[in-house]
Image: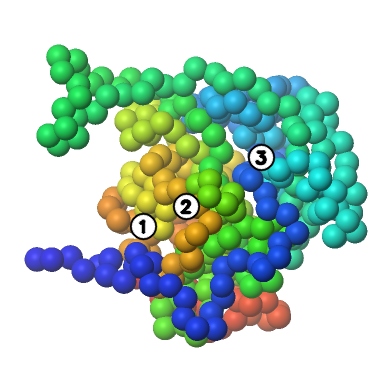
Amino acid sequence: MTDHSHAGLHSDAGARPGEHPGRARNPIVKVLDLAWLRFEKPDLERAETFAHAFGFSTAARTAEELWLRGVDAGPPCVLIRRGRRSRFVGPAFRADGAADLLRLAEAVGSRVEPLPDRLGGRRVGLTDPSGLRVDVVAETALSTALTGQPDRTFNFGHAVQRINRTQRPIREPARVQRLGHVVVQTTRYRRTLDWYLRHLGLIVSDFLYYPGQRDRGPVLGFLRCDRGSEPSDHHTLALTLGPSNRYLHSAYQVTDLDALAAGGEYLRDHGYRRSWGIGRHIQGSQIFDYWRDPDGFLVEHFSDGDMFDNTLAPGWAPMTASGLAQWGPPVSRDFLGVAPGRDALRELRAIATALRSDSEFDLHRLRGLMKVANS
């Protein structure tokens, strides 16, 4: 029997007349990439132990801070400061240079500030419409590359490249290469989306909308950096509408499926909890594997993602749970945030608050979300 469960979910269709164009006409600057993510956690020792099992290396460590890096040359991927509770502080995006920082600072009435000496460079501090702290940085210090996992030779079908040699991936941490993207939820989706397009020059790769609610506009956008003719990750930032403003997950590239799968076995052997995977997404095409760190943050290994230049217009597709992957296990309740526990209870309280406020998450949107969760 032919499976048609993914029919219409591949975003082959573009926008209809009058729908959101997915980019700003004259953005203030065009950032090049994510630089790093900032977190606060009470137990840096526990965070570092998980980070090494996940595939990070320690870039710097003090009594109050932990900086984590991948094997690629560049700044740290993750900056963690000791705090009373675990929380996501915000992302930093990399600008093209000092001139862009000055232009951005003048446009928003802010100022260019120096970063700590170990990071180097300068920053402009912003706050998005959801209240999230967003830094735009330039001229940061770049560490040299580390040794990564070796490239493997594959026999794809009849294209035989490996002869008289075996394939034996080692069950070890999947060595993170780089930070890929971050996903956040916002109660002010349209305002926040337009803010990132206007201030940072991001452009939309794909829009998703609740089934039957396309006329109300999208509720999820996958945003990439506009590097002109140079390809960029399908999404560097993803924004989704929800009853609270919160971090959903961040993603880190590894070399290939073998590294991802063997690294997952290593994490499982060491007692860590898989949230969802292994599978391949539809929007973005990444092979994925999601894990919960000891503080409850969702983190993703990914490989083989789509790369787009700035000529592609946004795709449009309905949002469904089954449409989150081309293949793999069914999406888990943990990944969807509906597994019983403190997080689900917190989100239920947020729903009650959102329905009494002027947020975009109203009763009609709640019905759409419930339809997605049950799809």
Q: Which disc, if any, is residue 333?
A: none
195 vs 25, nearest the viewer:
25
Relative image position of residue 127 (x, y in whole percent)? 78, 57
> 116 left or right of 162?
right
Q: Which residue is most to the front?
A: 229
As displayed, is residue 343 above or below residue 151? below
Q: What residue type is labelled 1?
A: Ile
Q: Which mark is residue 282?
A: 1
Residue 34 can be seen in this image:
yes
- Dot 2: element: strand
Tell me, for residue 35, which label it has, or none: 3
Give the residue type at disc 3.
Answer: Ala
Q: Distance between the residues labelled 2 and 3?
A: 19 Å
- Residue lying at 66% horizontally and 58% vertically, measured from the top left: 201
Which of the pair 240/8 is nearer the observer? Answer: 8
Element type at mark 3: strand
| Residue 308, label in figure | 2
Contact between labelled residues 3 and 2, with CB atoms less than 8 Å apart: no
Identified at 68% across, 26% down, the residue is: 142
- 103 horizontally vs 169: left or right: right
Q: Which of marks 2 and 3 is nearer the N terminus?
A: 3
Disc count in the image?
Answer: 3
**What residue is rendered at 76% in x and 29% in y?**
119
| Left or right: 295 in relation to 100 | left
Left or right for 111, reference 316: right
**Amino acid type, callout 2:** Phe
Of labels 2 and 1, the one closer to you: 2
Locate residue 327, reporting x and y percent: 27, 53
Placement of the C terminus among the 4 image quadrants: bottom left
Render colour scheme:
rainbow
Crowdedness near tag 1: few (<14), some (14–19) or many (≥20) residues, C-alpha within 10 Å: some
| CA distance for labels 2 and 1 | 15 Å
